[in-house]
Amino acid sequence: MPKKTLTFALMDAPYESANLTTAFRILDAAARRGHNINVFAYEGAAALAFTRQSPHPNPVHGKNVAEENHPTTKDQVTALLAVAAKNGGKVDWVNCGMCVDERGVNEFVPGTRRGSPADFQVFTDSSDNTLVIPTK
Amino acid sequence: MNNYLLIESRDPFESNDVGYYYELSKGLVEAGNEVTLFLVQNGVLAARPSAHSVALSALCQSGVKVLTDDFSLRERGISKLAEGIVAAPIDVIVDHLAAGHKTLWH
């Protein structure tokens, strides 16, 4: 299938919902197929690319940081960008500006940017398709 | 005729909204559209042979293509599916999006 441009709106905050696990799986599949991807990270999802996230040990299970191998969404975003680039696709990841200001998460991993809901409209207007994954 | 992909992430044992979503898929088929219902996350719990799987099997018979996310099934230890329901990879969603099908998430 020829390369398409797909837009995704995410709303769930990190570490709270299975929606994000599924969302990253869909994004990964799209990136591996070389599609161009737009992501509008809205509300809680604006913290997905926050750089100050850090993995932690699990003292209850007696595991250090390496053994726990705790995933962070900022690393998942970075990995998505890398997979897309490797397969010839582009990712335009926009973090909602008001959302990041409200939450104090205005430091993003490289390759993502600050924006507004207006970017989502531009995305949808210029995409082949859009999937909105709302909070429950 | 339009093509629709309806993604159901909720468990019908937990949310009564799920039944309305099943009805939506049936109504779209009856209106002459092609509809795929993709179950994911706790939505796959209804794919086990159970009280709620009867509704899904009926959807299959009415012309709705019912797929379940293979990863969600493995996470929940589900290996046996009710009649008409088929396991599928998450790539199916990307294929539908790339094909321009109308895609909704619930």
Image (cartoon, rainbow, N blue to C red):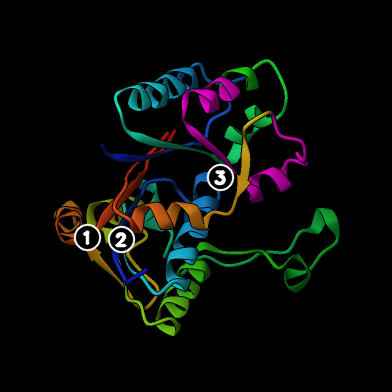
- Residue B65 in picture, x, y percent from top left: 50, 36
Which amino acid type corresponds to the residue marked 3 in the rendered image? Ala
Which image quadrant for residue A54?
bottom right
Left or right: A21, with A39 as reference point: right
* Contact between labelled residues 1 and 2, with CB atoms less than 8 Å apart: yes
A102 lies left or right of B79: left
Q: Label 2 vs label 1: CA separation?
A: 6 Å
Image mark for residue A127: 1
Q: Is residue A51 left or right of residue B12?
A: left
Q: Which amino acid type is marked by label 2?
A: Leu
N-terminal-most mark, 2 or 1: 2
Q: Which residues are magenta?
A: B56-82
Identify which amino acid the numbered label 1 is placed on: Ser
Q: In the rendered structure, the residue with mark 1 lies on which chain?
A: A
In this view of the protein, which residue sits in the foreground, B34 or A41?
A: B34
Q: Residues within 10 Å of mark 2 (few under 14, many from 20)?
A: many
Q: Residue at x 23, y 52 (%)?
A: A98
At horizontal 46% and vertical 74% (from top left) the residue drawn is: A78
Q: Is residue B54 above or below residue A87?
A: above
Report the residue marked by disc 3: A18
Q: Is B75 within the magenta?
A: yes
Membership of B103 in magenta stretch: no
Q: Quadrant of the C terminus of chain A?
A: top left
- Helix, strand, or loop for circle 2? strand
Residue B37: x %, y % from top left: 47, 36
Find disc 2 in the rendering and name its residue. Answer: A6
User: Which of the 4 quarters of the picture holds residue A16?
Assistant: top right
